Image (cartoon, helix red, strand yellow):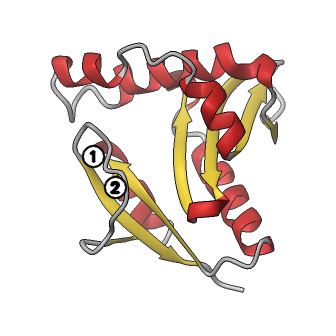
Amino acid sequence: MRAPSIRLARPADLAAIATVHAASVRQLCAGHYPPQAIDQWLAPSPGLYARMLRSSTVYVAERGGQVVAFAAVRLATREVRALYVSPGAAGGGLGLRLMRRLERVARAFGMVELRLWATLNAVGFYERLGWRRDVRQSGKRPPHRCVPMRKRLGG
């Protein structure tokens, strides 16, 4: 089977992005958050993904024409807004590939640092990629427990 391809997201991907997000949170975050927190996290928010597509640079990873992961960076605020991989595609390097893409884009726009709010299950992943916990981080905090992180981008 061919490796998943990565491309910029488009409006036609919104339903698939929502599906990946929900499946990823429900299965990959389940051991770190209680069911009621996950339900609240995934409560319908009309227009959430369309707003993300308008305000961020969003990439999707496709396998066989199906979206299996997505990532978003809001360049205006130097913030990674999302990185989710469907459970069936987790552990295969897609998260790494998507994060490297976001970091390359940020560097191309002259950014020297990015920040994000890591879900509890993803902190180790980000630390392995050179991200560090940042207790000084400000900005809109997610409604669920997350760890603020920051990364200096190399040249």
Q: Residue at x 20, y 25 (%)?
A: 37
Q: Residue at x 51, y 25 (%)?
A: 21
| Residue 122: x %, y % from top left | 37, 48
Q: Which mark is residue 151?
A: none
Position above or below: 66 against 71 = above
Q: Which residue is mark 1?
A: 120
Determine which quarter of the picture holds residue 35: top left
Position above or below: 151 against 78 = below
Q: Is residue 66 visible?
A: no
**7 to the left or right of 150:** right
Q: Amino acid at mark 1?
A: Leu
Q: Residues within 10 Å of mark 2 (few under 14, many from 20)?
A: some
Position above or below: 135 against 100 = below
Under circle 1, the secondary element is: helix
Q: Residue at x 36, y 19 (%)?
A: 26
Q: Are marks 2 and 1 in contact (CB under 8 Å)?
A: yes
Q: Which residue is mark 2?
A: 123
Q: Amino acid at mark 2?
A: Val
| Residue 83: x %, y % from top left | 54, 43
Give 76 or 124, whichever is nearer the viewer: 76
Q: Residues within 10 Å of mark 1 (few under 14, many from 20)?
A: some
Label total for image: 2
Alpha-carbon distance for marks 2 and 1? Answer: 6 Å
Q: Residue at x 54, y 54 (%)?
A: 80
**60 to the left or right of 125:** right
